[in-house]
Image (cartoon, rainbow, N blue to C red):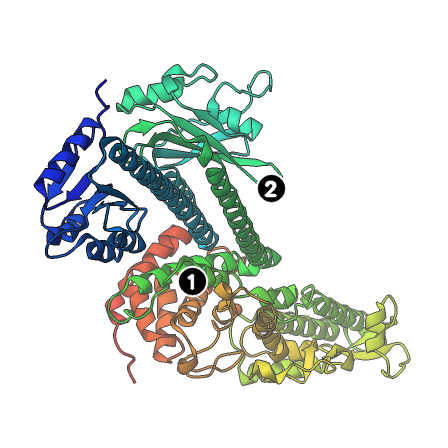
Amino acid sequence: MPASKKTNRILACDNADLDTAFLLSMLEADGYSNVTWINDARQVIPWLQREAFDLLVLDIDMPFINGVELTRLIREQFSEASLPILVITASADKEARNLALFHGANDYLNKPVDSVETSLRVRNLLTIRDIYKRQQNTELELEHKVKIRTDKLDMLIKNGIMMASEHDRTKLLNQILLESQKLLHCDGATLYLVTDDKTLRFAQRTRDDQLPMAEIPLFHADTGQPDERFVSTYVALHNTPVLIDNVALETRFDLSGTRQFDEQTGYKTISLLTVPLASVTGEVVGVLQFMNALDAATGQVIAFAPGMLHLVQALAAQAVVALDNLQLMEAQEQLMDNLFQMIATAIDAKSPYTGRHCSRVPELALMLAQVAHDDQTLFADFRFETADEWREFKMGAWLHDCGKVTTPEYVIDKATKLETINNRIHEIRTRFEVLLRDAEINRLLAPQAGQTADQANAQYAARAAQLQDDFAFLATCNTGTKPLTAPDLARLAQLAGTTWLRHFDDQLGLSVAETERRIGEPVVQLPVLEPLLADKPRHLFERDTSHHIDPRYGFKMEVPEKLYNHGELYNLSVIRGTLTLEERFKINEHMISTVMMLENMRFPKSLRRVPEYASTHHETLTGTGYPRRLTSADLSIPSRIMAIADIFEALTAPDRPYKKPNTVSEAIKVLFELKQARQIDADLFDLFLSSGLHIAYAHCFLKPEQIDEVDIAAYLGPVTP
Ligand SMILES: [Fe+2]
Ligand SMILES: [Fe+2]
């Protein structure tokens, strides 16, 4: 029977042709057809270095280099397992044979060689070589598998780190998908998210085609029962992965959607792996679906290896943690945003006089910041680099007047000089009524005192006219519509000295606080003469000096001695506007409150400049502002933007009661005066005008009748001395 053909490669070196021919014929008879014979011993090592052989047959007795020496040299480069050596020796030369074995020959044959012995020895050596080769292949295979697994674990670790640091939701979802696809080595992946309406929404896909808008309900609308027909809903409902090796043969699930998609796009989905994205509590928040696993070597579509399931589940677990973290962060940011907006809205709601100031200032500030941000000339260096920086500025703008929660409404809303909680003009008018009645009584009693009726009537008429005129004057003073002159002040003082007779006890019907303020006042006998306009100790409200403001805040504001002075003459004598010195401070004090409130809050790093942005809108470039008298060196571009936004909004607010809003041109004129006085930033003011933002803002927030022509050329350019 002919020997089966063997593939082992044998190199034989023997200078004796007859021995070689005999050996070759024996090997051929045994089925070894891949035998290379050389007769020059010096060529053996170069051959071995060039090509791989499974067995080397060497004659010992060769010219140039004998077999023993050659064996020694070969063993320096090739191990016994990788290249067995069979030496052929003359039977008498036992010493040479032993030496060859000593230097690494694996076996020997004595000349003349015996065919059976040769065949068996060759077979044995090649069997050992085959075992070694198989072992080596197994090792390589294992090494390869370990490398793939290590790579995938590395990918998983890297992915976990990347996901933990990603704060952008879309980028995070995309990353989850791409990394999973890479891990599974497949052609496409889709991410569904579970919605609040208990549906699956297509959130991301690695392929370029458009995401379907339709959502897949997890429950039947009519029965409320789980809808398990689709693989995606099944996975979400059961929190379990599903492997489909061949979509065409799948009978468990309705895959009509996948088939329809394939028909529409020409794509062919063969294998599918669908895994849930579930939190540690088992709540499924989404589903990852992978299609068409690819053979790493051929690129052919194959089924997903079940062994990959736990890796992709590990990645899904990481993804859920990352999504959870992101969701928490987003919720926290949202809550903080809502809280700040609520404060602004509450302040706006507190007083109709501020209208929607706290809500509109951020709008204008952001518009102006955007224009400055886009400007490539004077503001080329000003940039909000990240979404966080924009948010920080917006939050600062929302909170810019948060200290007004501490300002009493009557001060914010003080429309007349005598206003506290109510307008005390009515009380004073009643005194005028009393004086008029007194005059009337005097007229009626005059005949008894010897006066004629005519005299009495004339006296009364003059007095009545005087009282009417005096009250009209006093009432006009009360409105604060025009500044008082020195004669006005003198007339008020003189009027204040007019007296009326009080018959009733003014200690009755008072609150505890009112009574306390009157402690120390002398007891008077009724009736008693009272001044028409009174400035009494009870009108003075003491400042609480027990709480000192920490000097570290660096406030530089003149603090009036008294908290309030409700004196009637004192209030009516306010020269401009309606606010007393004490009330003006109380208004400005909202910045002290703003600073103290915000600088005591522990803002996250991304919002650390919120206090700065919120607290500098009343500062000026020349150090005349408040609360810290900062100067241009201290004021950042965002702070300067805030100042302009705050003033322009206040000037143009269309919704303040009893106050006609300025037109755009009137407001710009005021801003221009502030620019000239270096109260606001001239470049920003110019940018505000040249960008047309004053008009853009007006169209968004002002009444049409406020929008008029502004000759911006008259206002642009450097500040004139
Ligand atoms: Fe303010
Ligand atoms: Fe403001």
**Residue 260 in picture, x, y percent from top left:** 34, 19
The image quadrant that residue 713 belongs to is: bottom left
In this rendered view, identify the residue nearer to me: 190 or 214: 190
Q: Amino acid at mark 1?
A: Glu
In this rendered view, identify the residue nearer to me: 424 or 216: 216
Q: In the rendering, which numbered label is found on residue 389? A: 1
In what quadrant of the picture does the N terminus appear?
top left
> Mark 2: is the Cβ under 8 angstroms from ligand 2?
no
Count of marks placed on residues: 2
In what quadrant of the picture does the C terminus appear?
bottom left
Element type at mark 1: helix
Q: Which of the two discs, 2 and 1, sits closer to the camera?
A: 2
Which residue is pictured at 64% across the width and 64% down the height?
A: 409
Q: Amino acid at mark 2?
A: Val
How far apart in space, not on screen, are marks 2 and 1 (Cα)?
A: 34 Å
**Residue 660 in picture, x, y percent from top left:** 47, 60
In this rendered view, identify the residue nearer to me: 426 or 461: 426
Circle 2 is placed at which residue position? 280
* Visible residue check, residue 112: yes
On screen, residue 475 above or below 485? above
**Residue 654 in picture, x, y percent from top left:** 46, 56
* Visible residue check, residue 415: no
Callout 2 crowding tier (Cα within 10 Å): few <14, some 14–19, many ≥20: few
Q: In the displayed structure, does residue 23 sit left or right of residue 499?
A: left
Choose the circle earlier in sequence order: 2 or 1. Answer: 2
**Residue 318 in picture, x, y percent from top left:** 50, 45
Element type at mark 2: loop
